Amino acid sequence: MTSPVPHPGLADSAFLAAVRGEPVPHTPVWFMRQAGRSLPEYRKLREGIAMLDACMRPDTVVEITLQPVRRYGVDAAIFFSDIVLPLKAVGVDLDIVPGVGPVVARPVRTLEDVAAIPDLTPEHVDFVTESVRTLTGELGATPLIGFAGAPFTVASYLVEGGPSKEQALTKSLMFSQPEVWAALMDKIAQISAAYLQVQVAAGASAVQLFDSWAGSLTPTDYREHVMPWSQRVLASVTDVPRIHFGVGTSNLLGLMGDAGADVVGVDWRTPLSDGILRAGGRAVQGNLDPTLVFAPTELMTARADEIIAAGRAAPGHVFNLGHGVLPATDPDQLARLTDHVHAYPLD
Amino acid sequence: MTSPVPHPGLADSAFLAAVRGEPVPHTPVWFMRQAGRSLPEYRKLREGIAMLDACMRPDTVVEITLQPVRRYGVDAAIFFSDIVLPLKAVGVDLDIVPGVGPVVARPVRTLEDVAAIPDLTPEHVDFVTESVRTLTGELGATPLIGFAGAPFTVASYLVEGGPSKEQALTKSLMFSQPEVWAALMDKIAQISAAYLQVQVAAGASAVQLFDSWAGSLTPTDYREHVMPWSQRVLASVTDVPRIHFGVGTSNLLGLMGDAGADVVGVDWRTPLSDGILRAGGRAVQGNLDPTLVFAPTELMTARADEIIAAGRAAPGHVFNLGHGVLPATDPDQLARLTDHVHAYPLD
């Protein structure tokens, strides 16, 4: 089975034009976690289906990925998955516990633990290939963004055994056992790269590398202990634009761009104008505070206007929230925000 | 009972000299949360004593505050308390639940809820006055830093009803109900100001205003909805140096200084050299990653050296971690760090 022929309108889509830094028909917009718990149709579909099962069944992946595109008319779909899904696919014993997050049965702390994790091959994720092919057919001229966790963030789940506020064990391993750390990062970089390559081979138009917890690192530690592996992952998918995003990364935006990103995601803490300067001439994505959707519509749209205006200083700007959609978000408010961004006048 | 006569060496202490931007005998150092769970003598003393009880009994407050000064020989003591203690003292129904944090029985969401919270008078916190007086006597030439939570962070506990990752309800109230927000912030500013004034009147040599969660705000929202009240608190204690600290505040350091701080606390994410520039000519405090104490000693001290060297560009520099001591910290490692900072050569 070969990859589907791309829709003729895809290359000219607002999203792909913006990430290439070309003129756009309107400011493109999508929302991190647009597919998920804020949507009643998602909650209905997930009834009785565990999170990881929903990520591994093509029928649910396709439907969940499409739901926000249908509802909002956003300019891109994001492949429905989870940061730990590729680990699960290669056989790591883990689960996503509701109200907690990913829980790893046996945390990884030694070279033997790392060696026990298999490399990822396309056969591990047949369901991803099938889902992406179906999705690109359904999406037509709307780009699909592939998705993977960056090595540091994935490593933090493996080392801590679950979500962690401080990543103390992870950083302790990073500081104290550089050989184990390098082996672990090598392993995850292989898995994340292979996982993204599968999505691109099956038709994804762009990828986003999520380094959710990178913001807990100093620039020095990010540069020495993390960046080389994120760089390796990004360098493995050169055929499509690459977005690189983390939270609380004000001081890392330049490095995250230099790691090989075409687009630097900026969280809401950094004014977009500053983010553009720090991203070093790259396109940017962001960055409305996700809690601003709880504000009166006029305030939300006024802040969105400021962000769009600031975004004009970048070679390209993809409007987004500064982090994922919060579960309590009113979808009607996101619909209004989408329409508002689309209606914003071009220069 | 009048305030005790200050120890003759106090004014010349390294800590107070540094915050005034004067020459120091050595780089002063203390650690946020130096009193607490990382110390075996603390864990022993706390056996069978609930957190809030420990904060309200002069004997435990004094002993816990002194423990790290005795052990490490740090250059300042920090008054042992909790951010929600003044609320408890005026009668708000709350508790500190082990493993969770502060839990408020009836979250505050309306003008009536706010009006039901009494103002704080010195009589509410007699135990603070008594503790501080005893402490300043015991501490001699070592300064005692008073402590209070900033209005935004305290508000977040009251509105959310407990700790919260996103402060979504708090910011929702802030965006949507400005009158309720202003009333709540007025109330907390009064309480925090009065709480600090009590500590200063009883002999505290400096104060630190903790805005732990301010880093979740954009600079725009911080300036409009938070800064005026933090400013009011800081303006209420002009007789002693004021330190202003929050986590993840890279983009807020200038504003936090302008709010009336003499010293701006910098977390570990921001290189201290950048923090100094952003703090606008003020003294700074910080900023070793608290997880670096889990690294080999040589790596920890090498990073400390970089921070001390960078700190020389500020009018004054107080060495500290970039956030609180983590509970798993080895006290011997903090002892080595203290000695190392003290031995660092002056220019």
Image: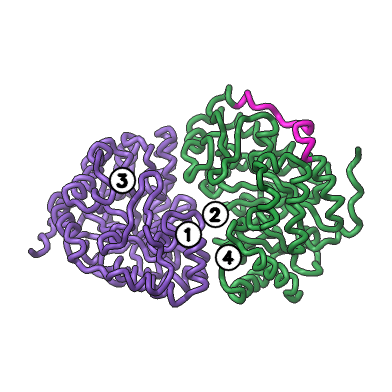
Chain colours: A purple, B green
Residue B265 visible in the shown view: yes
Q: Tell me which residue sits at (48%, 45%) in the image.
A: B165
Number of the label disc, if any, that sits on residue B248: 2
Task: Say few, some or many: other residues with alpha carbon within 10 Å of mark 1 (under 14 / 14 to 19 / 20 or more).
Answer: some
Chain of the residue under the numbered disc 4 shown in the image: B
Quadrant that contains the N terminus of chain A: bottom left
Do pointers 4 and 3 mark residues of a single chain? no
Q: Chain of mark 1?
A: A
Mark closer to the observer (1, 4): 1
Give B56 or B129, whichever is nearer the viewer.
B56
Q: Point out the stretch of residues depicted in magenta.
A: B114-128
Residue placed under numbered mark 1 in the picture: A215
Asked if marks 1 and 2 touch (Cβ < 8 Å), the reply is: yes
Q: Residue at x 69, y 36 (%)?
A: B86
| Image spot of residue B157 (x, y percent) | 56, 38
Q: Identify residue type, mark 2.
A: Gly
- The mark tally for this picture is 4
Residue matched to label 3: A34
Give x and y (percent) for residue A138: 14, 49
Label 4: which secondary element:
loop
Crowd around label 4: few <14 · some 14–19 · many ≥20 (10 Å): many
* Disc 3 element: loop
Residue at the left extreme of this rendering: A1
Report whether B286 appears left or right of A82: right
Number of the label disc, if any, that sits on residue B271: 4
The one nearer the camera, B88 or A64, is: B88
